[in-house]
Every structure is written in C-alpha cells, then in structure tokens.
Image (tube, rainbow, N blue to C red):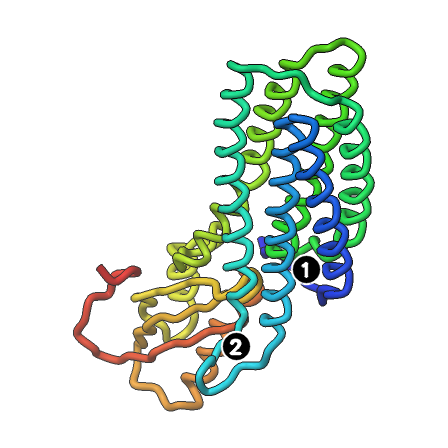
Amino acid sequence: MGHEHHHHEVEGKNLFFTILLNAGISLAELIGGVISGSISLISDAIHNFSDVISLIVSYIANKLSKRDATEKQTFGYKRSEIIAAFLNSATLIILAVFILFEAVERFINPVEISSNLVIWLALGSIVVNGLSVLFIKKDAEGNMNMKSAYLHLFGDMMTSIAVLIGGILMKYFHIYWIDPVFSILIAIYLLYLSWDIFKSSLKIMMQFTPEHIDIKEIAKEVAKIKDVKNLHHIHIWQISEHDIMFEAHLDLENDVKITDFERILKSVEDYLHDKYEIHHVTLQPEFMVDDNKEIIKK
C-alpha cells in the first residue's frame, strides 16, 4: 500500500500576520499576569511568547526551504523546516515542565488573584489565537513545520479557555487554587501536543528509516526483478518531510550492459515510487564483487 503525501505551497503572509497578533497578546498577558498575580495567565503569556518565537522560526524556515540548491548546499535548505519543527516542539516541552514546577509551587502557597484582569485578557487571547489558527489551518495540512506552529496556536487557544474558566471561578466563587490546577492541566496538555512532532522531527534529523517503509520487503521484492541477484547495504532517510532518499548496492546475476542496467534501474525506481513515494534513488551496480551481502552494512 502506498504512502501518500500531500504538499502545497505555504503562504508566508498568513504566518506573518499571526506573528504580529501573538506578539501583542503575549505582552498584554504577561503584564496582566504580573499585575493580577495569576500564574495561569503568566504561563499562558509564556506559552504565547514561545509561539511568537516558534512562528518566527517557522517563518524563516519556510522562506529558507524554498531556496534553490547550490554547489555548497546540494540539497538546498530543505531540512530547515524539520529543524524548526524540532526546535518548536522541544521549546514547548521545556516550557511545559517549567509551568508544572511553577504551578505546584503556587498550589502549595496560594495567593489572591485579580480575576477581572484574568477574564478580559483570557478572552483577548482566545480571539487572537482563534484567528491565528484559522490563518494557518490550511498551511498546516501536510507540512510538519507549519503543523508544529498550528499546534502551538491551537494549544494556546485551549489554554486561554482554561484560564478564562479559572478567572470566572475565582471571580464568582473565590476558588483561587483553581489557578495553579489549570496551569498543571495546561502543562500536561502542552506535553501531549508536542511529543509526537518532537519524536518525528528527531527521527528525520537522525536519518532513521521512515516508519512506513519495510526494508526487508524492499530487498525481497527487488530481488524478484529480472537479472537482479541481491539488494544490500541499503540506506533510506529523509532530508525533509516529503523527500525520501534511497541508496543501495545492487548485485547482478550477469555482467550486463549499461542499457540493460538502466532497464533494471527503471524497474527498481518504479517500484519504490509506486509503493513508498520514494523519488530519489541511487544504486551501485555490482557483479561478482566479494563483499558482505547483508541488507544493512554492520
């Protein structure tokens, strides 16, 4: 079964508007959190600030990824978006742990909080993040970098809703311990949101074989092609979310001509493209070469 990818051009202007909106609400929430004494509002502001940074990183990475390859950068800057996704998710995990520690401290030593400020700023944050989510929703489909930014913003909107509920409970029921409790829930939610992207981007950076690809099956199927004896020393990795690279040694049954090898190469390329969406294939032909024929070179 093939592994389908859907990739479209990301619109940088949507991301730019989103950065401006989030920078404004972050500053307002931070000032409001300090004035009101609300740890959940401060944690939401920190989260929003992390979003501004992550969105700027995403914006730069998106611009870089469109640059052409050169003699010095033969793959261009395609991996920049993966690095951005990794940095964004890693930042979110660190901030979530920080919020957890701060919230536990506040839970042990609760303070009275100015709930009106919390309510109004949380409402403002919900509106800003809601608009931001709508701005980049389309761009997040099929782009890990933009998806990490989208999840940051969606997480912000959800945390702002939690802060709003906390503000209402503090205003009308004077339940001040709800502020650190919601902060703890926010932190756990942020960890949940960012972990998958962190793992996926790290695997690409470490040049792991994509999860949907079965190397043993590839070796078995390619060996069925006419004149092929063995496929070994296989390497499969991604340079970006959508570009999978494949290289291997191809042991041949006979000492074939170049035109015959090109026919074999075309058969291998067609199989890898149709089955796994692999577009970049490099094969080293061999005949009577005495080396290790293991699938993976130890």
Q: Are marks 1 and 2 in contact (CB under 8 Å)?
A: no
Expressed as whole percent of the image width and height from the top left, the position of residue 280 reads: 50, 73
- The secondary structure type at the circle numbered 1 is loop
Residue 34 placement: quadrant: top right
Expressed as whole percent of the image width and height from the top left, the position of residue 161 reads: 75, 29
The residue at which mark 2 appears reads as 76
| Amino acid found under the numbered disc labelled 1 | His
Seen in the picture, residue 113 relative to 95 is either above or below; the reply is above
Residue positioned most to the left: 290
| Image disc number at residue 164 | none
Q: Distance between the residues labelled 1 and 2?
A: 21 Å
| Image disc number at residue 6 | 1
Q: Quick one: label 1, few (<14), some, or many (20+) residues within 10 Å?
A: few
Left or right side of 141 for 61: left
Residue 8 placement: quadrant: bottom right
Q: Which residue is drawn at 39% across and 57% down?
A: 206
Seen in the picture, residue 119 relative to 44 is either above or below; the reply is above
Left or right side of 173 for 253: left
Expressed as whole percent of the image width and height from the top left, the position of residue 218 reads: 43, 60
